[in-house]
Image (cartoon, grey):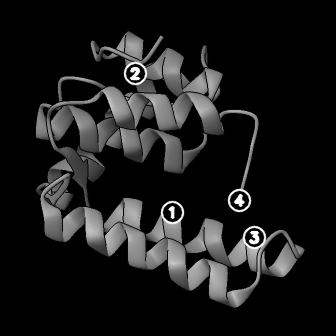
Amino acid sequence: MRDPNCNQAVDLFSDEKSPVVFNRLLKLEVCNALQLGVASGEMDERAAEKAEDRIHHFLKSGVWVTVEPNWERVFDRSVGYSRVHTASHPTRSFDILHVAVAAELGVRKFWSFDKRQRALALETGLRVNP
């Protein structure tokens, strides 16, 4: 699937030297995006399977690493972020969860192309992609 941010995303992955953190929330997001692509006709089932195979390759090769946070703390942190930031920076719950996971895991870089999610990430002290 191609979207307006595809080339920039490929550049980010290509330039990254550290492993990319992957977890159950990202697995859901990727799976759902692929299935939405199938539903919309942007891709067929075979293309979605190939994309999932590529993710498994990234995980097996160590380019991506599975790191699960303490989910209870993630949800507590997410509620806190919502209380403090959502009234002034309207952000969807799933976007808040992604920011909270990154903060909980202490990731060094947070990649997003969503303006509101990026604003929240910056407000909470994360470094975001340019």
Q: Which tag is nearer the camera, tag 3 or tag 1?
A: 3
Q: Dot 3 corresponds to which residue?
A: 37
Which residue does the image show at 29% across and 17% down from the upper left? 126
The kind of residue tagged 3 is Gly
> Are discs 2 and 3 less than 8 Å apart at CB?
no
Q: Distance between the residues labelled 4 and 3?
A: 7 Å
Q: x, y (%) of residue 119? A: 52, 15
Label 3 – label 1 distance at C-alpha:
12 Å
Q: Pick whichever, 26 or 3, lies toward us.
A: 3
Residue at the outermost bottom position: 45
Query: Could you tell me which residue is drawn at 46 percent across and 70 percent down?
Result: 28
In front of the other: 99 or 44: 44
Q: Which of marks 3 and 1 is nearer the N terminus?
A: 1
- Determine which residue is flagged by label 4: 1
Q: Which residue lies furthest to the right in this view?
A: 41
**Marks 4 and 3 close (CB-CB < 8 Å):** yes
Q: Which of 117 and 37 is in front in this view?
A: 37
Residue type, numbered disc 2: Ala
Structural distance between the alpha carbons of marks 2 and 3: 27 Å
Task: Choose the circle earlier in sequence order: 4 or 1.
Answer: 4
- Image x and y of residue 24, in percent: 31, 68
